[in-house]
Amino acid sequence: MPASKPAGGHNNVNTALVPYAANVQNSRGRRYQEAPPNYRTEYQRDRDRIVHSAAFRRLEYKTQVFVNHEGDMFRTRLTHSVEVAQIARSISRILNLNEDLVEAIALAHDLGHTPFGHAGQDALNRCMKEYGGFEHNLQSLRVVDELEERYAEFSGLNLTYESREGILKHCSPHRAKELGELGERFINKQQPSLEAQLTNVADEIAYNNHDMDDGMRSGLITLEQLCEMSLFAEQYETVIGQYKNLTERRTIHEVVRRMINSQVTDLIETSRANIESAVPSTIEDIRLQPQPLIRFSAEMNAYNLELKRFLRKGLYQHYRVRRMSTKADRIIKSLFEIFLDDQHLLPPEYDNKVSQMEKVEGVTGKARVVADYIAGMTDRYAIGEFERLFNPSQLT
Ligand code: MG
């Protein structure tokens, strides 16, 4: 039987950018001037630099909720970043925004994440309390601005302003002051580009839905529990009404994909209406809006809050996740303390960096290098370092 053609939809998408999309003409450029690329756009070049970075490759062995070695079926930060890029690019194309920029931001947004997900981030933030704290968004920016060592003429990846703006999703006003142009919007309460707004919401859609999916797969949350959530229950009724005798695995997948679809559809329709009533003509008009134009309807927002609350209670605070988190916390804390106490335990390149930074910023600089080293670790590398430093039977 011949394959049928898809009916309706948006097959003939106009790919011309809207005038208020980010583009090369209205770009605020790079920190270090470079000749324009020959056969790529500036944002494609950003994306390519991100894909070729060391921090990007390490995302494969970093996790959000489940530790990497708990099973090969769970998401990692790498697959999460690809999912965010997929969702964000689809929406971007429909809204005629800059898909290349959206992809760059999506693939870079988690580069600064510590090992062991939220637990690792919280632990490192506690360790760094007296030394300026640790925020994963700021760390992602630090990775692309300073920590990657790949190019002859500059440290970091020298990304465009717009990619950096998208990576820095949140920032405390205190920190914003130190960031110059990039920090201004947090002080002046302005918005980032629509591409940045969009990637931020795509991140939320991706992690809420995949945490639910992984949570089910791990057996930590049950189908009955999921049915307590209105958005899930609604789609679940449709699926079991339409298909009899589906396995639980297929049923869950059908429900989750419909949930993602309904969130994406709501986001496109609400944002499109917001843009129509705001009538922006330039990217500066977007930045001056009192609130983001890319957002869910009030109804979908309420559904999402319910989903988040469900995940916090049912998954993130599940006793088995807590057991993993407490181990993660101990590993991060122990590594931080031992390295801060004796910098010569660090690999020589970090030992040298500690000496350099200590000269400029004292113990705060020293702590920052230790935090950079720990934040860059994958889950398994952190476990390995802990074993090598604290397990008496490992004397090599
Ligand atoms: Mg994310």
Image: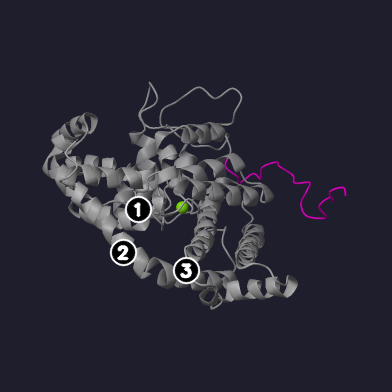
Look at the image and tell me whether residue 41 can be seen: yes
Instruction: Find residue 116 and name its label.
Output: 1
Instruction: Find residue 137 and name its label.
Output: none
Q: Quadrant of residue 236?
A: bottom right
- Secondary structure under tag 1 reads loop
Mark 3 residue crowding within 10 angstroms, few (<14) / some (14–19) / many (20+): some
Question: Of the residues shown, which amino acid type is indicated by label 3?
Answer: Lys
* Label 2 lies in ligand 1 vicinity (Cβ under 8 Å): no
Tell us which disc is closer to us: 2 or 1.
Answer: 2
Q: Which residues are magenta?
A: 1-22
Is residue 334 part of the magenta span, yes or no? no
Instruction: Give x and y (percent) for residue 18.
Output: 66, 45
Instruction: Give x and y (percent) for residue 373.
Output: 27, 40
Mark 1 residue crowding within 10 angstroms, few (<14) / some (14–19) / many (20+): many
The alpha-carbon separation of the residues under discs 2 and 3 comes to: 21 Å
Sequence order check, earlier mark of 3 and 1: 1
Is residue 11 part of the magenta span, yes or no? yes
Question: Of the residues shown, which amino acid type is indicated by label 2?
Answer: Arg
Sequence order check, earlier mark of 2 and 3: 3
Q: In this orientation, which residue lies closer to the viewer: 26 or 79?
A: 79
Q: Is residue 59 left or right of residue 24?
A: left
Q: What residue is shown with label 2?
A: 323
Tell us which disc is closer to us: 2 or 3.
Answer: 2
Instruction: Find residue 308 and name its label.
Output: 3
The alpha-carbon separation of the residues under discs 2 and 1 comes to: 12 Å
Instruction: Give x and y (percent) for residue 154.
Output: 37, 26
Seen from this angle, which residue lies furthest front? 393
- Secondary structure under tag 3 reads helix
The alpha-carbon separation of the residues under discs 3 and 1 comes to: 20 Å
Q: In this orientation, which residue lies closer to the viewer: 333 or 18?
A: 333
